[in-house]
Amino acid sequence: MKLVIDVKRCKGCNLCTLVCPYRIFQAGTKPNERGIIPPVLDRPERCANCRLQRLYGRVICGSCQMICPDQAIRWEEESPNEPQKAVVEL
């Protein structure tokens, strides 16, 4: 699974940056075509939901998706050939 921000729906409130326990969001710096600055993903591979949702068969965290007033955050299936990044934290 991978996390996706729909920049066409996002209004740039940055609530997701405040609630994520894994700190995978950062306030954006580039405005979209509507002039709104959506957040960007910073190290999305740290997201427990992205890594473990398929294993457990349920949503693990999802606080970013729940707090988003515009429903601009969702998870998508990754293609089998898509490169994956592994993170080891000490």
Image: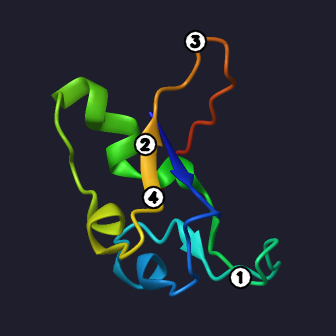
SS for dot 4: strand
In this image, 83 relative to 3: left or right?
Answer: right
SS for dot 3: loop
Q: Residue furthest front?
A: 34
SS for dot 1: loop
- Residue 64 image point, x, y percent: 36, 67
Q: Which residue is mark 4?
A: 73
Q: Name the kind of residue labelled 4 in the image.
A: Ile
When the figure is inspected, residue 36 is found, relative to residue 40, above or below; the finding is below
Q: Which residue is mark 1?
A: 37
In this image, 86 relative to 55: left or right?
Answer: right
Q: Which residue is mark 3?
A: 80
Q: Name the kind of residue labelled 3 in the image.
A: Pro
The reply to whether dot 4 and dot 2 touch (C-beta < 8 Å) is no
Work out whether mark 4 precedes mark 3 in sequence or the reverse, and give the earlier one: 4
Q: Which residue is mark 2?
A: 75
* Alpha carbon separation for disc pair 4 and 2: 7 Å
Q: Name the kind of residue labelled 1 in the image.
A: Ile
> Which residue lies at the image location 71% right of the left edge and 79% below the top edge?
28
The reply to whether dot 3 and dot 2 touch (C-beta < 8 Å) is no
Closer to the camera in the image, 41 or 72? 72
The reply to whether dot 4 and dot 3 touch (C-beta < 8 Å) is no
**How many neighbours does mark 4 have within 10 angstroms: few (below 14), some (14-19), or many (20 or more)?**
many
* Alpha carbon separation for disc pair 3 and 2: 15 Å
> Which residue lies at the image location 42% right of the left edge and 49% below the top edge?
74
When the figure is inspected, residue 5 is found, relative to residue 67, above or below; the finding is above
